[in-house]
Image (tube, rainbow, N blue to C red):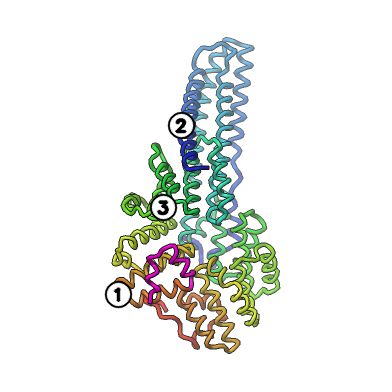
Amino acid sequence: MDSTPDSFLDTAALIRGSMPRPRRLWLWYATLAVVVMILTSIVTAEENPQLQAIVRFLSGLLMFAMVLAMGWFASHTLKQQRREQQRVEAIEELIQLRRWDHAAGMIQAMLSRPTLTMSGRLQALFYLSGVLARYDRFADAIVVHDYLLSHAQFDPITAHGLKLMRAMALLREDHLVDADRAMGELRREAPDSAGLALVEIYRDVKTGHPDEAIEVFKAKSAAIRTQLGHRIADAYILVARAHDVLDQSTEAAAAYENATLLTPVEELLRRYPEVRPLREKYGGAASPREGVQ
Amino acid sequence: MTAENAIARFRRDITLGALLKGALAVGAVLVLLLHFLPLPAAINPSLLLMLLVVVWVVLWYGTMKSSRLAAESSTLIASGMLEQAETQIEQSLRAFSMSRSVKSLGLLNLALLRLAQKRWPDTALLCRELLASRGPMPEHVSKSGRLMLADSLLEMGDLRAAHDALTGLYRHRLSLSESLHLLRVQSDYLAAIGAWGELMRDVENKVSLAEIMPPQHGARLQAILALAAKQTGQAEWANWLRRRVELLVDVRELVATRPLLGQLWET
């Protein structure tokens, strides 16, 4: 990678530089040439029967060359597009495996130049927003979210995920009014979303409304478990903080233990800096995994 | 659409598609050759070639449409919209397509839908048809077909056939989602034959992979690992994994699908 640390994952540059180039016009020129050739051969055949054989022979050669060229071009383009799709899939796998540095490097390399397809570009930008959030660059992540939501049409599930990520990033950046508006929109679209419940719990903990956070958790814990799986640890750690604020140390300790049973403490503290005071107060669940508590 | 109907249509379309592609290729070569032969002025080979191109473009448009339907239906299945997926898959299977890969993808999606609907014999039948069909097949279709075949055979209690289906996969390079699926099916198989020691091998890595699986699958894998830990006397692992499972799923529902796991909660 030749980029300096300052320009690493420069969102504006990546959004600008990754736009696919417009398709070349030579395909239209080739089609025009074929039409001209056909018309010429018809006119020649009518006007000068002696020249007809020569024109037909030459147009035959040209046709043959064009068929070969178009076949090669189609196969070449398909191979390049497949390679780009494989790179996007590799980025997705690296993110799933939490190999953030590798994923960031691949995204930087892919979006630094025009992509071949718009779908590949949008997928890579989607993953870029996730990596930026992981690096605590929430303002940059919001820029990418806004760009994607205003410039692309996603299926409802992906669009919902993107809006959730944006709402969480807004909360992390303390843009509470914008976050509240984003949550209102999410509530209208998918009131039963477990992701939305998690964002609401975080908002309540962050703004000092522990009772509301506990209420939301009680009402939505079954949905959070079914829809978010291991990420229920996030809800447990936030609820632990809510109980702690209310001086309910028994409940706080139980929720803290549940959270740390599912996810390492360090990871939870990274995601939600507001829960740091819990670490000194409560003992996390012991893990048989090496080096994990 | 029944599995038998889908298979009959798949076979018919594959044959028809191959014949049509062959006819178009032969036609194109013949028309090209016509350019070099002395012909009456009324016959213009360039015009004939254009006509062939138009026919090819029209057929390819249908193929692309069918391909889009097939691609969308897998997303619908993943998001649990099974009825919509059923309609879409049926449309994709009924639509004509010149491409063998598109037809295979349609049949694979139907197998995936039947797996989600827990219709194991149909899934096995469709996967067997895919794996038995001659000619080039996209690698991901054959790998997914094999994984689903092993999965459905395990559910039907045919351990030997499930083992054979799994064995064929070790020769392939798998993507992350395929590796996760393989780990899940393999663990089910090892638990069914009581290979507890083998299950506990590289347990830390298996737990990490379980964490990125869909919630139900991840919880079931951890429950199987907890049982393996219990059977091999590793109480700390057994206890830790069992408590995680209790936080992730409804234990009664889990035991209803895998009665063997009931041993974890016996007093």
Label count reads 3
* Cα distance between the residues tagged 1 and 3: 31 Å
Other-residue count near label 3 (Cα within 10 Å), few / some / many at <14 / 14–19 / ≥20: many
Q: Give, as a three-letter code, the residue at label 1.
A: Gly
Q: Give, as a three-letter code, the residue at label 3.
A: Ser
Mark 1 and mark 2 on one chain = yes
* Residue A155, x across and y down, in percent: 61, 54
Q: B247 or A9: which is nearer to us?
A: B247
Q: Check the image and report above or below for B5 versus A165.
A: above
Which residue corresponds to mark 3? B152
User: Which chain's residue wears label 1?
Assistant: B
- For residue A95, say whether it is visible: no
Q: Check the image and report above or below for A164 versus B63.
A: below
Q: Check the image and report above or below for B185 versus B138.
A: below
The magenta span reads B247-267
Q: Which residue occupies 67% across, 69% down?
A: A183
User: Which chain's residue wears label 2?
Assistant: B
Main secondary structure found in the magenta portion: helix
Q: Give, as a three-letter code, the residue at label 2.
A: Thr
Which residue corresponds to mark 2? B15
